[in-house]
Amino acid sequence: MHKDSVKAVEQLLKESTTCENWMTPRLYTVTPADSFDHARKLLKSKRINQLPIVGSGKMLLGIVTDRDLRDAVLPGFEDCRIESVMSSPAITLARHSTLVNAAEVLRLSRIGSVPIVDGNSLVGIITRSDILEAFVAFANGRYRPSRPRNRFRKRAARQPKLSKR
């Protein structure tokens, strides 16, 4: 292993980097009263895998994933409220939790993301991809994201251009 990579891993393992530095703060959310169909369409159109369910004041009430929606095919599902399929309470981490702690929660819980909270208020989400991005950044000598965390803009920029035939 390259000497700098070893140092980067050591830095990461010192647990000095927090989720707050690597989470995505701008989120798409739904409320418990939103329809199953609305959540399904939002997941598909925004190309995301999870939606936090929030109440007043961004209070996190639960989470719903694309898998939850796939597994809950119900007759007349379009009109069902999202609260009937959401996972509640959601597994969460505090904004100052370390990346190592987040990685352990994701691994042990076998989930792809975890909402980040400040008290009871949702402030972001961290995914396996965020943690991998942090690891790569550490290996390259960068200890914080080089730009504001806005995964949605980044995804749109990565889309292949379609040519007309």
Image: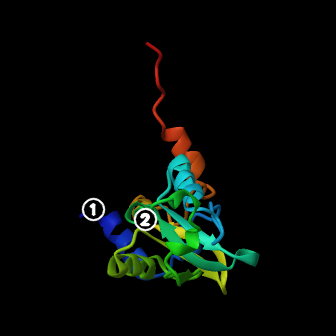
**Distance between the alpha carbons at the discs numbered 2 and 1:** 13 Å
What amino acid type is highlighted by mark number 1? His
Expressed as whole percent of the image width and height from the top left, the position of residue 7 reads 36, 71
- In front: label 2 or label 1: 2
The answer to which quarter of the image holds residue 9 is: bottom left
Position of the C terminus by quadrant:
top left
Against 97, is 158 above or below? above
Q: Residues within 10 Å of mark 2 (few under 14, many from 20)?
A: many
Secondary element at tag 2: helix
Tell me which residue sits at (57%, 74%) in the image.
Answer: 83
Tell me which residue sits at (63%, 57%) in the image.
Answer: 148
Q: Earlier in the sequence, mark 2 or mark 1?
A: 1
Question: Which residue reaches farthest front?
Answer: 75
Q: Nearer the viewer, residue 75 or 92?
A: 75
Q: Nearer the viewer, residue 78 or 91?
A: 78
Against 115, is 14 above or below? below
Tell me which residue sits at (47%, 16%) in the image.
Answer: 164
Q: Which residue is mark 1?
A: 2
Tell me which residue sits at (49%, 61%) in the image.
Answer: 142
The answer to which quarter of the image holds residue 36 is: bottom right
Q: Which residue is mark 2?
A: 138
